[in-house]
Amino acid sequence: MMDVAVIEDPATAEVTLDPTRARLLAELAEPGSATTLAARVGLPRQKVNYHLRTLEQHGLVELVEERRKGNVTERVLRATAVAYVISPAVLAAVQPDPDRAPDRLSARWLLALGSRLVRDVGTLITGAAKAQKRVATFAIDGEIRFASAADRSAFAEELTQTVTALVAKYHDENAEGGRDHRLLVAIHPTTNPNGSS
């Protein structure tokens, strides 16, 4: 089971947006059958079976084992991942394009950059999984409390200068065998778990 699976197919994304199927996916972090799931989610076994077949057709759940119980074969399934992310590529025609209106101070541009990050890293993860390789990535995540808007502005300027100097130091346009990497640095106010900022 993967930690995170990236959904790049519109039909698969649509399947996961159904609340019942999303609940079944969450329940299937641990293997279960239609019978055991029906008791947990309060639905008839036949209805659960229908949803499980749909999830299986889209590669969201996989067969773990089959158990014979009298004249019936019970299928035990589990989710293919602990969590799922829907790539912006699912909405290819309307996905955000950070090249359309670059603005370092725009929250909407930051969202477009984040969208591209999800799309690109999702594509890399999918390709690496098929090739049974790892993706070379690096990330820093943290929080900082600024005393004032002026401090935040000064920090952003100093960060820009430092990152620009590092890029100039290590970027080699003509490196034979080199590989391009995308760098994204972002600052935004934190939000608390209940959604307010």
Image (cartoon, grey):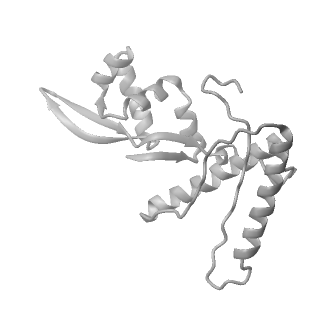
Q: Is residue 147 above or below residue 171?
A: above
How far across and how far down the image is residue 57, in percent? Answer: 43, 40
Number of numbered discs present? 0
- Most foreground residue, 185 or 147: 147
Relative to 179, is 150 on the left or the right?
right
- Most foreground residue, 33 or 150: 150
Residue 35 sits in quarter: top left
Q: Residue furthest front?
A: 147
Which residue does the image show at 47% across and 23% down from the upper left? 20
Q: Residue furthest left?
A: 70
Which residue does the image show at 39% across and 31% down from the upper left? 52
Q: Is residue 5 above or below residue 191?
A: below
Q: Is residue 32 above or below residue 167?
A: above
Residue 160 sits in quarter: bottom right
Which residue does the image show at 51% across and 62% down from the upper left? 135
Relative to 151, is 6 on the left or the right?
left
How far across and how far down the image is residue 126, in percent? Answer: 51, 56
- Most foreground residue, 116 or 51: 116
Relative to 157, is 75 on the left or the right?
left
How far across and how far down the image is residue 197, in percent? Answer: 71, 27
Which residue does the image show at 45% across and 61% down from the upper left? 130
Residue 189 sits in quarter: top right
- Most foreground residue, 158 or 68: 158
Q: Is residue 67 above or below residue 169?
A: above
